[in-house]
Structures are given as C-alpha cells and as structure tokens.
Image: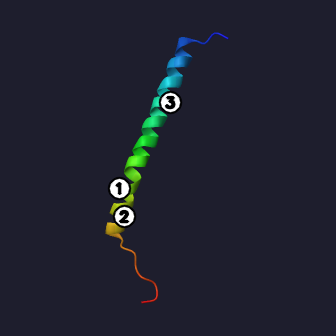
Amino acid sequence: MPRSKGMVIGFWIATALFCLQIGFTAYAQPRLRTLGNAAYPQRKVGT
C-alpha cells in the first residue's frame, strides 16, 4: 500500500498540532482556574 508523501506530511503536521493543543490545555487550565477563583471567590453557603 504506497503512501503519498503529502499524506505522510499532513499526518505528522496534524499530530504535532494536536500535541501542542493538548500541551497548552494541560498548562493553561490550572492557571485559568486560579485566575477565575481570584476574580470570583467562592461564597460560603448558609452563612
């Protein structure tokens, strides 16, 4: 089953972009959660 060079290059570009997106999400999510808690602190219910 011969593969064209364009298909292989496209596959690796898509894989690299996916890995960058996953890495950025893993890096940014805790930081965004911290910023959200600072801007909107949790209120205690019942007091």
Which residue is denoted by mark 3 in the rendering?
A: 15
Q: Which of pointers 2 and 1 indicates the residue nearer the eye? A: 1
Where does residue 6 sit, x and y in percent of width and height?
53, 15
Horizontal arrangement in the rendering, residue 14 relative to residue 40 (left or right):
right
Which residue is denoted by mark 1 in the rendering?
A: 31
Query: Please, what is the three-letter code of the amino acid marked with disc 1?
Result: Arg
Residue 15, relative to residue 29: is it above or below? Answer: above
Where does residue 37 sit, x and y in percent of width and height?
36, 67
Front-most of residues 23 and 9: 23
Where does residue 27 sit, x and y in percent of width and height?
38, 48
Which element carries disc 1, helix, strand or loop? Answer: helix
Q: Are marks 3 and 2 in contact (CB under 8 Å)?
A: no
Residue 16, relative to residue 4: is it above or below? Answer: below
Classify 10 Å Cα crowding around label 3: few (below 14), some (14-19), many (20 and above).
few
Residue 33, relative to residue 25: is it above or below? Answer: below
Query: Please, what is the three-letter code of the amino acid marked with disc 3?
Result: Thr
Label 3 to label 2: alpha-carbon separation = 31 Å
Which element carries disc 2, helix, strand or loop? Answer: helix
What residue sits 42% from the left and 48% below the top? 26
Taking the view exactly as shown, the residue that stands out farthest to the right is 1
Classify 10 Å Cα crowding around label 2: few (below 14), some (14-19), many (20 and above).
few
Which element carries disc 3, helix, strand or loop? Answer: helix
